[in-house]
Image (tube, grey):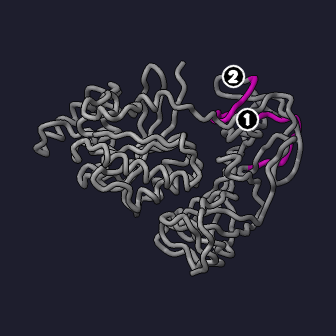
Amino acid sequence: MSDLLRLATAGSVDDGKSTLVGRLLYDTKSVLADQLDAVHRASADRGLATPDLSLLVDGLRSEREQGITIDVAYRYFATPKRSFVLADTPGHVQYTRNTVTGASTAQLGILLVDARKGVIEQTRRHAAVLALLGVPRLVLAVNKIDLVGYDESNFALTAKEFTSHAVALGYAEADVQTIPVSALVGDNVVERSANTPWYTGPTLLDYLETVPVEPDPHHVPFRFPVQYVIRPRTPEFPDYRGYAGQVAAGTITPGEEIVVLPSGSRSVVTRIDTPDGELAEATAGQSVTLILSHDLDISRGDLISVASTPPRLADEFEATLCWLADKDLRPNARVLVKHGTKTTQAVIGELVSRFDEQKLSSVELPESLRLNEIGQVRLRTAEPLPIDDYTVNRRTGAFLVVDAGDGTTLAAGLVGAPLPVKDAVSPGP
C-alpha cells in the first residue's frame, strides 16, 4: 500500500499554480474522461488551441470567469508509488487566509515563482507563513522557464535567493528543493525536459514520490476533543454513554487511564466503538466513540487526554497570530477563541511584536496588526484551555480567533510558536 503525502501550493497571481496542478493531474492520468471533455469544451469556447489545464482545478464559476483561484481547491491523485492530497491555494494577497487554511495540514509546500520575475514580496510572505505553520519541506518551482529561453543563470539566481531566504526562516538547505518547470509545456513536471540539460535534479513528480513523509502525530500524547455525548436511552442500550470525536493526536487502547480537561476527572477507557464495530486501538485521524469505566460529567468542548502526559491548562498564554481580517487588531480587543471543539470568550491583551516577513525582523510593541500581518500577542481566555505548544502538536497547539459579533474568522493562532526572526528587534509602532 502506498503512503500518503499532503501538499499545498502557493505563489503570486499568474505564476501558474492551477496550471501546474492541472498538469500533474493530466500527466499522471488522474483526470476522468468527462472532466477532460469539459476542459476541452471550455478551452475551445475561449478560442484556445490547447486545453487550459488550470480549469481542472479552478472549480468555482467565479474563478473560471475571472481566470484566478479564489478558494482552496483540494485534489486527490495517486501514482504506483504514493497517494497525494493537494491543496491549491490562492495567490492574491487578500486571500492569504486561504493559504493558511490549505497549508495547515501540509507536509510539503510547493511555492511557484515566474522565472521572469523571480522571488517577489508574495513569495517571501508565503514562505514565512509555511515556516510558521511548521510545514517541514519546501519546493520552489521556477515556472515559465520556457519564457526566459531555458536560461540556466536565471534559474540559478532565483534558486539561490529563495534558498537563502528559506534557510533564514529556519529551514535546512537539504529540505529546500528548487526545480525549473514549465507547467504549460510540461518541462520537468512529470517528464524530464531535454530543454534543460544543465538541470540534473529530480522532476517535480520524482521528488514528490520520493521525499520522506513526516509521520502522522501518533508518537505524541493522546488528545481527543469531545464533539458529542451519545446517550441513546433505548431499551436496547439503557445505560450506554459514549463520547464521540476525532482523535487529534496519539493513540489510545482499552485499559489506559485518561484525564478529562478542564475538570481533571480521571477514568479508564473500557471500549472503543465505531459504526463498524469495536477497535483494539484508535489513532490520530480516526473518528471513534470512547466508553469509560466511570459515569463522568463530560460535554462537548472537553478534551480527553492520556493521564500520564496531559496538556497544560491555561487561561493566559502567548501565541503567534496570522491576522486575516480587514479591520486592524489593537490591544484589549474582545474576541472568541475556538480551540478544538470548545469556544470561549477572550481578550487579546498586549501586542508583543509584529513580524516583518520581508526583512525577517520584528517590531516591538506595535500599535496594531493589519490584514496578513503576523505577530506575537498575549491572550486571556474566560475559561482555561488544554493547550500544547504548536511545535509539539499542531492540532492542540492551534486555534482560531473569531469575531464575537458576526462569527467571522479574524486570525489563525499558534500557541508558543516562535517568530523566525534573524535581526534585532526594532522599536514600534
Name which residue lies at 54% across and 40% down: 174
Q: Which residue carries the number 1 mark? A: 219
| Rendered image: mark on residue 235 | none
Q: Label 2 is placed on what type of residue?
A: Gly
Q: Foreground mark, 1 or 2?
A: 1
Is 354 displayed left or right of 243 in the figure? left
Name which residue lies at 48% across and 48% down: 102
- Residue 323 in sight from this viewpoint: no
Magenta region: which residues? 280-299
Q: Label 1 is placed on what type of residue?
A: His
Give the image location of residue 324, x and y in percent: 50, 64
What is the secondary structure assignment of the residue under circle 2?
A: strand
The magenta stretch spans residue 207: no
- Residue 374 in sight from this viewpoint: yes
In terms of depth relative to the viewer, which is nearer, 54 or 133? 133
The magenta stretch spans residue 296: yes
Magenta part mainly helix, strand or loop?
loop
Q: State whether residue 233 is above or below residue 383.
A: above
Name which residue lies at 47% across and 21% down: 81
Mark sitting earlier along the chain (1/2): 1
Whole-number angstrom distance, CA of label 1 to CA of label 2: 25 Å
Label 1 crowd (10 A; few <14 / some 14-19 / many >=20) = few
Give the image location of residue 160, x and y in percent: 43, 50
Q: State whether residue 247 is above or below residue 89.
A: above
Give the image location of residue 427, x and y in percent: 61, 80
Q: Which residue carries the number 2 mark? A: 277
What is the secondary structure assignment of the residue under circle 1?
A: loop
